[in-house]
Amino acid sequence: MSQAYPNLLKPLDLGFTELKNRVLMGSMHTGLEDRFWNIHKLARYFAERAEGGIGLMVTGGFSPNMVGQLSPFASTMNNRGTAMLHRHVTSEVHDAGGKICLQLLHAGRYSYHPFSVSASATKAPITPFKAKALSTKAVDKQIDDFVSAAKLAKMARYDGVEVMGSEGYFINQFLCERTNKRKDKWGGPFENRMQLPVEIVRRMREAVGPDFIIIYRLSMLDLVEGGQTWDEVVKLGKAIEKAGATIINTGIGWHEARVPTIVTSVPRGGFSEVTAKFYGEVDIPVCTTNRINTPEKGEEILSGGKADMVSMARPLLADSEFVRKAQENRSDEINTCIACNQACLDHVFQLKRASCLVNPRACHETELVLTVAPVSRRVAVVGAGPAGLAAATTAAKRGHNVTLFEADDKIGGQFNYAKRIPGKEEFYETLRYYQRQIELLDIDLQLNTRVDADRLKQDGFDDVIIATGVKPRTPGIDGIDHPKVLGYLDVLRHNKPVGNSVAVIGAGGIGFDVSEFLTHDFSHHPEGQQADFEDWKAEWGVQPDYEGPGGLAERKPTSTPRKIYLMQRKTSKVGGGLGKTSGWVHRNSLKHRDVEMIGGCSYDRIDDQGLHITLSDKEGKVIESRVLDVDNVVICAGQEPFRELFDDLAAQGVKTHLIGGADVAEELDAKRAIRQGTEVAAGV
Ligand code: FAD
Ligand code: NAP
Ligand code: SF4
């Protein structure tokens, strides 16, 4: 057993029950909660994580009534039948030695349906529906529903509930002047506004008795105008303790906040400073959260006296064995969450089932089953990018004898460029994970080996998996051979010098990333290092001491070494195709660095003067022609499959499996590459 994380792995005595360690799996909606026929999948998902040793888990949000549902037919805990169904979840978790709480989440004005209700008649910027104001009596009814839902959770044999009081949901809407304009006893001074959560917890405790966990998720930092002040947060926290809560968990930022709180560019564990400021105000255990993704970071926070527990949600989606690996001193084997949101939150916001970019089995535990192969075969995987790495490690886990060929001197493919982008340092972790897996699984890794069809044929493999990736597209622009033209690989792979003014052609994920790279001041934050949290707060407009309403401050301008023009041919919003929950952060970050984003461009020619463009409106009418007097033009115009090897083998009649970018380059991302690599290898 590891002594490396003594604080993280120490049991926590709650008086009537004990948690085996300080890791709380934070609530995450997966989509499995919403349909009763998925209950066994949900049970397996949690049971795998309980088997992995997590101290306490919290389910995704369940509304206590219909009006509080996140969307029509979304997860609700409002009748005995549902409670009995949930016994499948609780019994599997308990059999695996785990503990689990049900989260009670009333969405209020964040409900994505026309029957939403809130403290006052307001509309959130993130939904199309305006909420109706509740009558005084109807507020009481919402409290009754919270209390009934907690009793149902107890009937379902949950170990407790978490009351969602943060992230801008219903309870948070009562707390803040921003959304609470009421004149009755639930509005006006903060003492009135805070009565809703206090009454919920007080009456809930009365109803469920003393031996039932009540976690209260306290919004410690609203990050919206008209949010709570620090004094108000502390006052509420103390009242919630008195009302009978067992644990106070941290909430950071409303969903409508324009400060990122969990995307990959948020420095690891930064927001634990907010919990640290609160810690000591109450005697019950306090849990911290946001961007904690390694046992080392968790231990550092707890040993620094900032909290009693750490909440991690996405990291436990990425690796169900996170805690076990920490216990066994195998943290270098953890498949680390890179905070990309691509398969978890982005899916949930598109009403799709969540999964994980680095772990496609997440939320698919009963479907993507990796069995031991009946016969061990000799498998060649060509290309050690994300697709090839996933395929090679999956095949080896199943007992196959795997050789992995890579033309480069290192594994990772395009992830080696992604990890260089400021704010994407987490991508290093995926390569560390695969490197370690290759060692553990005894994969024969052949670097600096550009393998060809003859060699593969000669070696007589049973299966050949082609994962040779993509090559950048070169658009047919007049002057494309001009010396000032560079490809994104010239910048990110070959480190070619780049001038002070740059036109970036193509505003997809790579165009945005290259712009971020070129506007970054590396003398301040060297490559590979995450931003300092205080600098980051200044850039995004977060008060250093979190004292004022919502904790917001003026944003500090960011110095940038270059003028960038970022362009696309489409007339739609530049960057509109980026991730649902992270695209706004990328757009906002570049705007803050004065990057000029131009849509509706046609690229006329490139010459000594610069880049000549013509701009058109949505109807195709020409608006103007411009010459961008730039030192360099960087091409980020998408990619094409790189599959010569596949074609050669096919010509020789060798059957292969084609995966990743080599298969389809359009709309390729690492999520698809890793999933496809895993699925193909699950079947060989
Ligand atoms: P590749 O990564 O291209 O790997 C192919 C590998 O095959 C290469 O290592 C190559 O050297 C090797 N190879 C080719 N031919 C041979 C041969 N004959 N013999 C041996 N080896 C060979 N995706 C996301 O999902 N999220 C992001 O945030 C993200 N950010 C990105 C940022 C940047 C700057 C870049 C460039 C890409 C980013 N991507 C991102 C895209 C992601 O990296 C790709 O979708 C992914 O790498 C594709 O994986 P792949 O394995 O199919 O191909
Ligand atoms: P992409 O997202 O497809 O973007 C390509 C860009 O090039 C678009 O802006 C496109 O816009 C433009 N373009 C396409 N053909 C062109 C042509 N012939 N001439 C000029 N412009 C052209 O591809 P990418 O940026 O190369 O990214 C590759 C993959 O990596 C993407 O699928 C992306 O999901 C993934 N990625 C993700 C992230 C992330 O943060 N999630 C980051 C980086 C990469 P117009 O057609 O309008 O000009
Ligand atoms: Fe983490 Fe990305 Fe996986 Fe979500 S999809 S759990 S953010 S690695």
Image: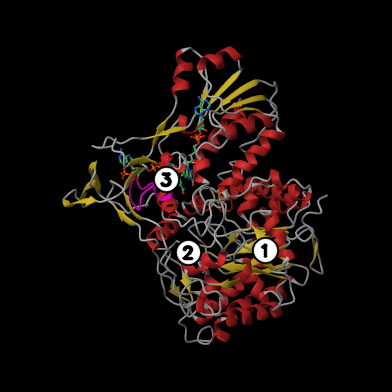
The answer to whether one can see residue 281 in this image is yes
Q: Magenta region: which residues?
A: 496-513
| 265 shown above or below 428 | below
The amino acid type found where label 2 is placed reads Ser
Dot 2, crowdedness within 10 Å: few (<14), some or many (≥20)? Answer: many
> What amino acid type should be assigned to the residue bearing mark 1?
Leu
Residue 152: image tag: 1
Name the element at disc 2.
loop
Q: Nearer the viewer, mark 3 or mark 2?
A: 3
Indicate yes or no whether the magenta region holds residue 505: yes
Within 8 Å of ligand 2, the CB of disc 3? yes
Picture coordinates of residue 331, whole percent (x, y): 71, 48
Instruction: Say which label, 2 or 1, has the lower sequence index.
Output: 2
Nearer-the-camera pick, 35 or 664: 664
Is label 1 within 8 A of ligand 3 (CB to nearest ligand atom)?
no
The type of residue carrying mark 3 is: Ile
x, y (%) of residue 477?
A: 26, 37
Residue 303, how many percent across, how many down?
Answer: 74, 64
Whole-angstrom CA distance, mark 1 to mark 3, is 48 Å
Q: Residue at x 44, y 19 (%)?
A: 647
Label 1, secondary structure: give it: helix
Q: Nearer the viewer, mark 2 or mark 1?
A: 2
Nearer to us of marks 1 and 3 is 3
Q: Are marks 1 and 3 in contact (CB under 8 Å)?
A: no
Q: Secondary structure at mark 3?
A: helix
Residue placed under numbered mark 3 in the picture: 510
Q: Is residue 256 left or right of residue 333?
A: left
Is 567 located above or below residue 213 in the figure? above
Which of the labelled discs sits on residue 111, or is there none? 2
Is residue 416 placed above or below 326 in the rendered structure? above
- Residue 448 falls in which quadrant of the image? top right
